[in-house]
Amino acid sequence: MKYLKYISLAMLPLACSCEKELDFKYTDIEPILVIEGYQNEEGSSVALTLTTPMDEPMDLTRLTDASVTIADLTESRAITLSPDVEGNFVSSEAGVPGHEYRLTVVRNGKTHSAQAFMGKPTAIFGLEFQWIKMPYDYVAVLQVSFEDNPTTAGDSYWVRIYRNGEPYTWTVVTDNIAVDGRIDEVIMTSRKDLDEEDDDEALRDGDIVTATVCPISRSMRDYLEALSTGGSNGPRMFEGDFCLGFFLPAPVTESSITFRPDEMEEYK
């Protein structure tokens, strides 16, 4: 049996970057193509990689020997993406909220396609840090408050947090916690005693913390939740020849706050 690493979530520069390493048991097989496609109101980016055997170092090398297109099914037109200097297939043509899109990747004679709807952007009302008392220490919690459409049910959102422009953490939120068109999501971050905190979790005075929020489909929510538990690849999101990955057309809203631990109150 052979284990494969699935290296996932290489993000658009204006969106987020996050990696999660997942282990899956397979019989001896060839590496599997991984497609990670993003489209928002500033452009598109698609990363192509291969799964990596567990007994080998992670390989994040981008594949560029493919044809990558995104079709706007609402307006019956398509764009071709080209590799940039980092090996990601990109286009500066903006996605349009309310439109349906299809990503198609052709490589080595195999075709993979995924179709998804770009929802409408949501507004972020504000960010706020407070301390919460835990048995082992005080912990800084970040409350991200944003808009939810009260006329629809089952809406889901991907909330991503950055520290000084670098990926920090992320979570998936559903509208079952919404009240009067508002969602207040509380995210635990850094301990107060930084001597006891890991460097990748620590927040320090003056750090710029940025939150982004984008609406996602139920299948994308299931995909992200599967990654967060580390139990599986999640639902298959591409038709045609088998591959792993996802396609996410979604507008991204962002807001930032400066971390000031001496000015924070205790969470009530």
Image: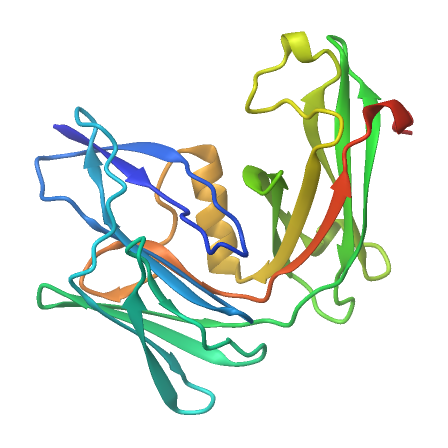
Lateral position of residue 47 relative to residue 170, left or right: left
Residue 46: image location, x then y, percent: 35, 61
Residue sitting at x 29%, y 69%: 82
Image quarter hosting the C terminus: top right
Lateral position of residue 123 relative to residue 9, left or right: right
Residue sitting at x 21%, y 54%: 63
Residue sitting at x 64%, y 8%: 196
Residue 139: image location, x then y, percent: 75, 21
Judging depth in this view, the residue of 24 and 120 nearest the camera is 120
178 versus 77 height, above or below: above
Judging depth in this view, the residue of 115 and 204 nearest the camera is 204
Residue sitting at x 18%, y 65%: 66
Q: How many marks?
A: 0
Residue 22: image location, x then y, percent: 34, 33
167 versus 146 height, above or below: above
Q: Residue furthest bottom?
A: 76
Name the quadrant containing residue 104: bottom left
Residue 72: image location, x then y, percent: 42, 83
Colour scheme in use:
rainbow
10 versus 150 height, above or below: above
Lateral position of residue 225 relative to residue 121, left or right: left
